[in-house]
Image (cartoon, coloured by chain):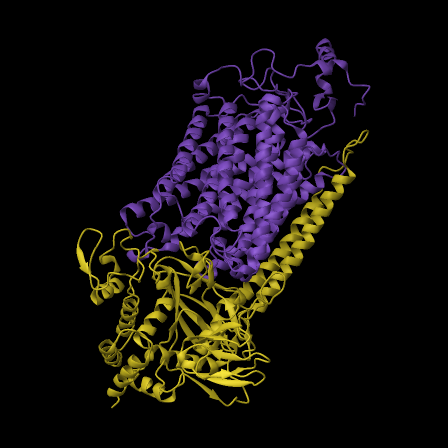
């Protein structure tokens, strides 16, 4: 029964999801595959149990739920996660007809005031929010629903996993004139050093500038004015202005060193997360096997990062945490922090690594090429919420139907940095191809059929072949992908064929 | 001090240009007399024009990249081209302009004359240095058509091992440029040791020469490490032997150690000649000896030696051990002290002076303020915990531009204006010079002050794209860059125009007391018509302005010379 249920679940998923292709065979194969495979992460062996349990509870599971995808539910006394408004800021409820992101599988409150909201898609047929009538809706599927009001305002409701909604929020930009607000328990010491040396610098600069300008004005040449004799040296002054700066620098060094030791020495860490960097993506692997390109961490608990690179030197830099550490190939480096405040924070690569150094793990760009959604650090409000993230995301990863899994991996594994899905070539060929199932010519003349084998080889041994016009060997190997993930990518690519 | 009435009339008729033979610019003609010259002044002038051209090239890359950064996303170019812009800007400026700048151009032209010598110790080696510079420069520029360069001027591995751009062409160029620098340093060391006249002991040397001496020590000791490093990088790229490549057991961080072991002393090779120039400028234009001469002289030497001990401060987050970080942080603070001593001494020199704001002085005063900011912001980066936040952000970019451009390049421009009349025989347009000097100061600050704030707010460097929160800082910075670039361009054009339009220069337009001002303007082939007489260093008592922009020594008056002869 434990073996059969996931297959049945997969079949149901295949039939009810919005995919155009009938992926029955691959889905079944992948479900069995995932149950049998040990996997590279610490995913517990009873994957079948996990997915079965998730299917039953409905929380966090992909589209495994049955029945209407949008239902009206009673509004709970305490609301769950925030929604994200058109300005990308968090709000407790949807307050107008516009572009919102809302979490899946929990009640979402609509308080529209005098507007009403009408749904434009079959999934939501009949579901509407009346004016002046706060309503709570439950969305069970990750999808985007266009909506409008009878006053002809238009918008969309994008439904995503709650943790991805958090990651899509605007980055916290609160801070002083000089720096973002520090959100790491041990950052206050280094901030104190920054402001101390800032004050010192302003003091010395003001002194030197004042003396210079004053002397230039007072002793400027004018008719009849001459230089007057004065001492050519003064050993006491020299010694004074050598000794005092030396003492100051001893203090700066000492307290800099002490605060540095705190910044780089983790306590017996409560949470350890593996970091893998490559051109141009981050992959954060949590202790239960969850992988993500955003870094989700709990507040109030020390987090230790164990980091390595697949290719060149990158650097993990979270300004709000005041944490930076180079990430090296064939070596592990470490960093730690203890977040103090929930929120979404900037994450950047701080060691030049090539073309998309400025856009590591970029999930969306606008038409000037500007990255509108880079990877972020999401600090959950406490350890319990972080654990819920781990459970929900793991279930999602296990239970997503293949095409949705492939689409998620396309973004989360950084394939999007080099491959588009709209037909235009980038560093690599676009995944939207008219040639599926046909023979194509490789660089070097050989003819190969573009099928599942070809895609699999391209993922595992990318240096084996190249299409004309693309650089052989430019793509790194993704041989740590599980078979279910490879199947998902294949399904996604197939779904894109013209 | 002489009053107006007591200036002997005969001083006003003393010859300014050489009388016994044509000056060095006119004594021989034709391109071969320049291409095969052994005259340090002609070699220095050829260096100067190469360096000014490179400044234009490097500056163009800077304006291109700052234009791209006007808005997030693509403004004029995509990320690959942008990465080439910042790489080439850095490589051209560091290797072709700032490292050779003051020593190779102005040091070559002026230092032997200031020393009272007829030439450098090894004139042929000097010419060889110049041609090595030309070859290295050509190779570096040839990277552009042969695939470009996108590694950053720092060439970090493993990226520089994998990129398909023309790394080996660039490293070959850098290798040759290194030898140019080593030979120049060697030449200057021997010249300063052996070619001083009677009466010029070590503590009668102008501080400019102390600075060149300290620089030459670093050039000779540090540059070979750069040569070997780029050689290893070239061999690794070509033969894949696994020195730096981790997939073959190599260590990419080792490259950083080798690279910075040279490149940290290199930044002192850049700044110390600038400091030497500033000592001259401030002294002459304030009519005062440099306060604390010995301390300033010793600080040039101590900086030269201490600079070898701090390279690891570029690598605090590289994966280097905590012990190494501690040692490098402590040593880094020591290296800031001699620089601070110099700044205090220069400001003290202004006390009770008689200050003229000629172009050279405007650059000199700019240096004082901008170098202070550059040096103080270095303190932030030396503090380990603060550096963790600021490393590889725009804060570092602003810091090094304050010391490399706001200080070294400003000193270079000041020196250029100060000595221009001496070696060209022409006065530049003073008003244009002063205005451009002000433009450089203002434009520079508008460009780089916002970058400190941007960096502390978390904006990483070498980024083609950025979050909209940073846009206002980038835009202010770009506007400043255009003001700065325009000011430098106009000042160089104005200098070159003086060949045609400038009035003839006097022998001593500024009233300097060091030996180059007693040589004719322009100097003869072997610099002096009569053997130079060493006067007390930085003593301006004897000098009077007999006409606008023309100074003479009272003791040079022919009546007094005759009286001396009669007395014997």
Outermost residue, left direction? A446
As drawn, is A121 to the left or to the right of B162? Answer: right
The residue closer to the viewer here, A412 or B394, is A412
Q: How many numbered callouts?
A: 0
Q: Quarter holding the C terminus of chain A?
A: bottom left
Q: Quadrant of residue B302?
A: top right
Q: In which quarter of the image is residue A139?
A: bottom left
**Chain with yellow colouring:** A
As drawn, is A71 to the left or to the right of A96? Answer: left
A50 lies above or below B343: below
Q: Quarter holding the N terminus of chain A?
A: bottom left
State the image coordinates of residue B485 (x, y, percent, origin top left).
Answer: 57, 40
B297 lies above or below B8: below
As drawn, is B494 to the left or to the right of B62? Answer: right
The residue closer to the viewer here, B337 or A437, is A437
State the image coordinates of residue A153 (x, y, percent, origin top left).
Answer: 53, 72
Visible residue check, residue B349: yes
As drawn, is B15 to the left or to the right of A75? Answer: right
The residue closer to the viewer here, B383 or B453, is B453
Q: Residue at x 71, y 42 (%)?
A: A234
Visible residue check, residue A270: no
State the image coordinates of residue B488 (x, y, percent, origin top left).
Answer: 58, 37
**Chain with purple colouring:** B
The residue closer to the viewer here, A489 or B106, is A489
State the image coordinates of residue A283 (x, y, percent, origin top left).
Answer: 38, 68
B452 lies above or below A288: above
């Amino acid at each position: 029964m434990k073996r059969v249920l996931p297959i049945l679940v997969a079949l149901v998923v295949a039939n009810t999801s919005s995919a155009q292709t009938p992926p029955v065979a691959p889905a079944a194969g992948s479900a069995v595959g995932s149950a049998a495979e040990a996997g590279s992460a610490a995913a517990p062996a009873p994957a079948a149990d996990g997915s079965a349990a998730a299917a039953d509870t409905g929380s966090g599971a992909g589209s495994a739920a049955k029945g209407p995808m949008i239902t009206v539910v009673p509004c709970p006394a305490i609301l769950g996660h925030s929604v994200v408004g058109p300005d990308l800021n968090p709000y407790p409820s949807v307050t107008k007809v516009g572009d919102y992101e809302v979490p899946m599988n929990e009640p979402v409150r609509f308080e529209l005031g005098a507007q009403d909201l009408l749904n434009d898609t079959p999934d939501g047929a009949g579901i509407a929010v009346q004016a002046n009538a706060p309503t709570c809706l439950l969305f069970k599927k990750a999808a985007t629903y266009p909506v409008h009001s009878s006053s002809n305002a238009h918008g969309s409701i994008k439904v995503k996993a709650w943790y991805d909604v958090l990651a899509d929020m605007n980055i916290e930009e609160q801070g002083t004139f000089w720096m973002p607000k520090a959100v790491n328990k041990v950052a206050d010491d280094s901030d104190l050093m920054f402001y101390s040396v800032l004050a010192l610098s302003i003091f010395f600069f003001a002194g030197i500038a004042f003396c210079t300008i004053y002397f230039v004005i007072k002793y400027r040449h004018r008719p009849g004015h001459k230089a007057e004799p004065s001492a050519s040296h003064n050993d006491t002054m020299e010694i004074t202005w050598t000794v005092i700066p030396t003492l100051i620098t001893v203090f700066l060094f000492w307290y800099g060193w002490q605060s540095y030791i705190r910044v780089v020495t983790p306590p017996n860490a409560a949470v350890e997360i593996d970091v893998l960097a490559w051109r141009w993506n981050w992959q954060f692997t949590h202790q239960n096997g969850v992988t993500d390109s955003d870094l989700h961490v709990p507040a109030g608990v020390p987090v230790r990062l164990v980091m390595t690179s697949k290719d060149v030197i990158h650097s993990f830099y979270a300004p709000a945490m005041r944490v930076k550490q180079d990430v090296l190939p064939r070596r592990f480096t470490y960093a730690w922090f203890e977040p103090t405040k929930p929120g979404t924070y900037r994450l950047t690569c701080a060691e030049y690594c090539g073309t998309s150094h400025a856009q590591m793990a970029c999930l969306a760009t606008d038409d000037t090429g500007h990255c509108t959604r880079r990877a972020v650090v999401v600090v959950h409000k406490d350890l319990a919420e972080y654990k819920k993230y781990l459970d929900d995301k793991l279930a999602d990863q296990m239970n997503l139907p293949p095409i949705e899994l492939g689409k998620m991996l396309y973004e989360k594994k950084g394939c999007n940095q080099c491959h588009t899905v709209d037909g235009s070539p980038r560093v690599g060929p676009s995944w939207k191809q008219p040639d599926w199932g046909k023979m194509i010519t490789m660089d070097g003349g050989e003819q190969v059929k573009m099928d599942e084998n070809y895609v699999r080889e391209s993922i595992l041994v990318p240096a084996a072949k190249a299409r004309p016009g693309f650089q052989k060997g430019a793509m790194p190997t993704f041989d740590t992908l599980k078979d279910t993930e490879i199947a998902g990518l294949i399904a996604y690519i197939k779904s894109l064929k013209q | 001090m002489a009053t107006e009435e007591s200036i002997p009339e005969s001083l006003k008729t003393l010859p300014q240009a050489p009388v016994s033979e044509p000056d060095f610019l006119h004594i021989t003609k034709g391109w071969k007399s320049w291409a095969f010259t052994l005259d340090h002044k002609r070699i220095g002038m050829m260096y100067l024009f190469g360096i000014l051209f490179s400044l234009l090239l490097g500056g163009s890359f800077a304006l291109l990249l700052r234009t791209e950064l006007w808005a997030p996303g693509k403004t004029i170019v995509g990320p690959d081209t942008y990465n080439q812009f910042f790489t080439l800007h850095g490589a051209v400026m560091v290797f072709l302009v700032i490292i050779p700048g003051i020593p190779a151009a102005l040091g070559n032209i002026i230092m032997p004359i200031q020393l009272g010598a007829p030439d450098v110790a090894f004139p042929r080696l000097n010419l060889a240095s110049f041609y090595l510079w030309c070859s290295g420069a050509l190779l570096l520029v040839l990277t552009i058509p042969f695939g470009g360069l996108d590694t950053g001027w720092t060439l970090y591995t493993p990226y520089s091992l994998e990129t398909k751009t023309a790394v080996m062409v660039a490293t070959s160029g850098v290798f040759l440029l290194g030898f140019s620098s080593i030979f120049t340093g060697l030449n200057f060391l021997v010249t300063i040791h052996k070619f001083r006249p009677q009466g010029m002991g070590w503590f009668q040397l102008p501080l400019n020469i102390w600075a060149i001496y300290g620089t030459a020590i670093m050039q000779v000791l540090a540059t070979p490490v750069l040569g070997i490093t780029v050689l290893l990088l070239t061999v690794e790229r070509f033969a894949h032997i696994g020195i730096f490549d981790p997939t073959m057991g190599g260590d990419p961080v080792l490259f950083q150690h080798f690279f910075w072991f040279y490149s940290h002393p290199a930044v002192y090779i850049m700044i110390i000649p600038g400091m030497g120039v500033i000592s001259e400028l401030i002294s002459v234009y304030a009519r005062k000896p440099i306060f604390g001469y010995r301390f300033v002289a010793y600080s040039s030497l101590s900086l030269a030696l201490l600079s070898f001990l701090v390279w690891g401060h570029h690598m605090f987050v590289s994966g280097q051990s905590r012990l190494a970080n501690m040692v490098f942080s402590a040593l880094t603070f020591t290296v800031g002290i001699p620089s601070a001593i110099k700044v205090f001494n220069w400001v003290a020199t202004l006390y009770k002076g008689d200050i003229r704001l000629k172009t050279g002085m405007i650059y000199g005063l700019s240096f004082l303020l901008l170098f202070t900011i550059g040096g103080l912001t270095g303190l932030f980066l030396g503090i380990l915990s603060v550096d963790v936040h600021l490393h590889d952000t725009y804060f570092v970019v602003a810091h090094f531009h304050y010391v490399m451009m706001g200080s070294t390049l400003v000193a270079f421009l000041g020196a250029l204006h100060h000595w221009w009349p001496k070696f060209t025989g022409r006065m530049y347009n003073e008003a244009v010079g002063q205005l451009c000097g002000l433009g450089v100061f203002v434009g520079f600050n508008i460009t780089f002050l916002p970058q400190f704030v941007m960096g502390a707010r978390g904006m990483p460097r070498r980024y083609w794209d950025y979050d909209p929160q940073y846009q206002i800082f980038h835009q202010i910075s770009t506007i400043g860059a255009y003001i700065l670039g325009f000011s430098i361009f106009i000042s160089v054009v104005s200098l070159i125009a003086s060949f045609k339009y400038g009035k003839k220069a006097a022998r001593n337009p500024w009233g300097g007391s060091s030996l180059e001002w007693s040589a004719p303007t322009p100097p003869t082939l072997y610099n002096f018509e009569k053997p130079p007489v060493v006067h007390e260093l930085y003593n301006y008592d004897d000098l009077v302005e007999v006409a606008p922009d023309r100074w003479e020594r009272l003791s040079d008056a022919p009546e007094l010379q005759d009286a001396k002869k009669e007395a014997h």
